[in-house]
Image: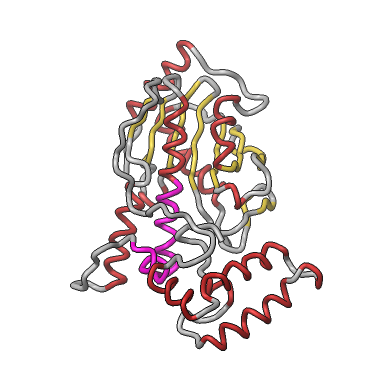
Amino acid sequence: MADSPISPTPYEVLGVSATAPQEELRRAYRRLLRQTHPDTGGDPARFVAVQEAWERVGTPDDRAAYDRSGRGAGPRDDASWAPRPAQSRADTRPRARSHGHPGGWRRERYLVLMREWVGRGEPLEDPYDAGLVRSAPREIRHILADALAEEATARSLSTLGIGYTIWHDVDTGNPEEKIDHIVLGPTGLFAMLSEDFGAPVTIRRGELAGETIGDGRPMHDLGARAKVIVRATRVKFTALVIVVPDDELGEAVVQLGSIRGSAALVVRHSALLALLRDGVPGTRVVGGNELFDVRTRLQSAIRFV
């Protein structure tokens, strides 16, 4: 289980309430262990998840530690979910030109919803406390997970170099329907969403699918948002890209087809920079006066949420 706010809690993996008695927890673990065991035709990934869940809450001591911290024993990431402070960097090479505040709108939205969920007038000393986050409704956890995904993508994009320009949190008329990142460089113009679905995704009929996506159509939604920018600027996107955590996609890059002449791709976070530097196969390089013209149009038209 990846240490993301939207990752299933051990209780969710085991299919029990967080207040279930220890014996009920044990029975659920043993039942799922039999059902998911690869030797009996079970899903190896679920089998591992069940074991990891038990490592975190299988004993009263481990369970108490998890309930206090929201993380407990087992695989974890010690990094806080709070915003990272600005740090001086040892690398003095020029970075990509960047505009906007990546993850900013979602963090603000998360804080508003978390305060409403805790209750007005109730103390909220640390809205990023892991135990508090894990106990919040999935919708609230998902907003924080997406903010973290946007920030992680932005950190990677900043290393592309001075030949690239990036706009974050781009307004398309409704903050809920923003474009997380627009990237312009020698390999083209890219509209991007950074997503953390909290579970593996697959491809079905040119769209992302998965148990946590449900009836959602993330690539279709990105295409509709990109259309707003195209109309305002008269530019054409080379590709529409959805970035997901590495453990949510079986391949580094998967092409879903095209939308209005723009390639539609889903990519692992670790493969994003290579895609942007090498370009999408079959697309042309953008440079010189054309690059300057596209940047000027975008800079004059883009607004932020």
Which residue is pictured at 63% across the width and 24% down the height? 283
Q: Where the N terminus falls, by quadrant?
A: bottom right
Figure disc tally: 0
Q: Is residue 304 magenta?
A: no
Q: Residue furthest front?
A: 61
Q: Residue furthest left?
A: 121
Residue 52 placement: quadrant: bottom right
Q: As displayed, is residue 231 above or below residue 110?
A: above
Which residue is pictured at 21% across the width and 70% down the height? 123
Q: Magenta residues, as a range?
A: 129-149
Secondary structure mostly seen in the magenta stretch: helix
Using residue 118 as the reference point, say whether residue 268 is left or right of it.
Answer: right
Q: Where the C terminus falls, by quadrant?
A: top left
Which residue is pictured at 46% across the width and 30% down the height? 183
Q: As displayed, is residue 102 above or below residue 157?
A: below
Q: Position of residue 32 (x, y in %)?
A: 67, 77
Closer-to-camera residue (104/67) = 67
Closer-to-camera residue (85/238) = 85
Using residue 25 as the reference point, say whether residue 123 is left or right of it.
Answer: left
Which residue is pictured at 68% across the width and 48% down the height? 250
Q: Position of residue 9 (x, y in %)?
A: 50, 69
The colour scheme used to paint the residues is secondary structure
Q: Position of residue 60 (x, y in %)?
A: 48, 81
